[in-house]
Structure formats: structure tokens, C-alpha cells
Amino acid sequence: MVGYFIALLVTKTLAGLPIVFVRIGALSRMLLLRSISSNKKLTQRELDEIYRPENVQYGWEFPSQLLVIVIVFTYAIISPVILPVGVLFFGGSLVVYKKQVLYVYQPVYESGGAMFPSALQRSLFGLVCGQLTLIGYLLTRGLFWQPFSLLPLPIFTVWGMRYFDMHFAEPSKRLSLERAREYDRVSDIRAKSNYNRDEGNQRNGDEVRRSQFTKDSYRQPVLTQDAMVPKNYRRGQNDPLTLECRQKLKELQHYSLMEDPTIEEDTEAQTNEN
């Protein structure tokens, strides 16, 4: 079976990595959209959709790399000839993905390293598969003491997986105690420097954070957004129709505010308070 996996790794190296480098999917999409559309007749939103940035497909790229790790770890014991093929694949992957990440792909979100613990756990799982394969291979050769001496290896590896998850992965999802104490200390220092002479006392950090709290904190984002303004037909180019539409909307919004009785009541109440 190792011959099949060596052929698989050679194919992924000589065919899969060039496909990632050329980006045939994005190239085909671009050629298709350019052939059936005209930039002069498209809106700015449609142009942004055609030339949208491409992000790394982590759900596809991570499993592809982890599959090679598991294959190499498992069959390196039975047939070490797979090791140079694995080195060739990962060497090519380093060149291709480093160039793509630095110059081609544009991040559209930030996960804060949430995928790294999962990738580490799967890599260690591949190491466990290799250790069990080594123990089983030695048993098939009629040996006893050598497999018995290697039996703690997968146990230690599984223990290490749980240790990493408990002491690194889970704590990284929460704010550390040192960072939380530092935030409170900085807030208290800023609060002490803010002396309120009218009340004649100093506000502590809790009161400062309470004063900065707004009613929009727990509202849906769509309910806190301002009124939308029409954009130009082309970015960076003034459009007379867009300017005219903005002026009309401005007049209509001003008229609606003046006609709203709640606005007038709030204005009168604020005047009386002043």
C-alpha cells in the first residue's frame, strides 16, 4: 500500500501545489465574468463582487496538510522511502503557501489562532498512529520486549494532547488573570486622574466604565447604524445624480425630523433643563 501513498504524495506535490499556485478556480471565475460582462455597465458593487479579495480556505488547506502528516507518520515505519517524498511535499508547500499568504490572499476575518490547537491535536494524532504502527510491526516480526518497551509512547503522546488542550488551548479562549488585573489597574489610574470638581469626589474605575456604557451596547447592529448615503457610481468619481439624490435625502430627512412631534418634545425638554 505504500506505493499508492507515495504516488499520491508525488501527485499532490507535482500537480496539487501548482494548482494552488496558479489558482485555477479564481482564474476561471475571473475569465468567465469578464467574458459575459462589461465594466462600463456594471455598478461599483458589482465590480467589487467580481474583484473581491480571496481568503485562505482553511477548511480545505488544513486537512490536506494534515492528511500528508498522518500518511508520512504511519508509513515511515514500514517503508522509510516515503520520508523524502514527504520532505519534498512540505518543502514545496512552504514555498507556495508562503507566497500566496504574503502576496495573494487577503484576510477577511481574524480568528485569533482558534484553529491552531485543532491542527496541533490532529498532528499528534498522526504521531500516535505511527507509534501504534511501529508496535504492531514489531509484533508481526515475532518480537516481544521491544514492543513492550515502546508501549508508553502512545500513552505519553495522548497525555501530552490532553495537557496542551487543558493548559494552552482552553486558557487561550479567556482573558488571562494578569491581563485582567492590568486592565483594571489602568482604568483606576485613568479614573483617579479624572477629578470631578462639581461633585467634589473622585470617580473609581467602575463608575468610569458605567459612564461610558451606552444603550446601544446590546442592540442589534442594524438598529444602531446611521442613515445610509448613496455612493457614487464609480469610486473616486463624482456623479451629479448621486449628489442630487444626497441633497434631496438630506432635505427629506430634515423635514421628517422637523415634523416629528417626539423630536420637538425632546427639544423643549432639553431647553427647559438648560
Image (tube, rainbow, N blue to C red):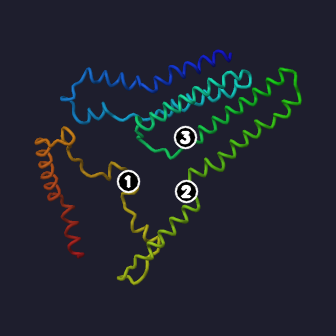
Q: Nearer the viewer, residue 200 or 145?
A: 145
Above or below, comparing residue 214 to residue 32 in the picture: below
**Percent from the top left, x then y, of residue 168?**
63, 49
Q: Secondary structure at mark 2?
A: loop
Q: Residues within 10 Å of mark 1 (few under 14, many from 20)?
A: few
**According to the image, label 2 marks what residue?**
175
Q: Nearer the viewer, residue 214 or 102?
A: 102
Q: Earlier in the sequence, mark 2 or mark 1?
A: 2
Quadrant containing the N terminus in the rendered view: top right
> How many numbered discs sit on the rendered protein?
3
Taking the image as shown, residue 206 lies to the left or right of residue 236, namely right
Q: Residues within 10 Å of mark 3 (few under 14, many from 20)?
A: few
Q: Secondary structure at mark 1?
A: loop
Q: Amino acid at mark 3?
A: Met
**According to the image, label 1 marks what residue?**
219
**Percent from the top left, x then y, of residue 49?**
31, 33
**According to the image, label 3 marks what residue?**
115
**Percent from the top left, x then y, of residue 180?**
54, 62
Tell which tag, 2 or 1, sits nearer the viewer: 2
Above or below, comparing residue 236 to residue 56 in the picture: below
Q: Earlier in the sequence, mark 3 or mark 2?
A: 3
Quarter of image, res 268: bottom left
Taking the image as shown, residue 77 lies to the left or right of residue 70, namely right
Q: Residue at x 86, y 30 (%)?
A: 146
The residue furthest bottom is 200
Between marks 2 and 1, how big is the CA–CA gap? 24 Å
Above or below, comparing residue 3 to residue 101 in the picture: above
Marks 3 and 2 in Cβ contact (< 8 Å): no
Q: Residue at x 61, y 27 (%)?
A: 68
Q: Amino acid at mark 1?
A: Arg
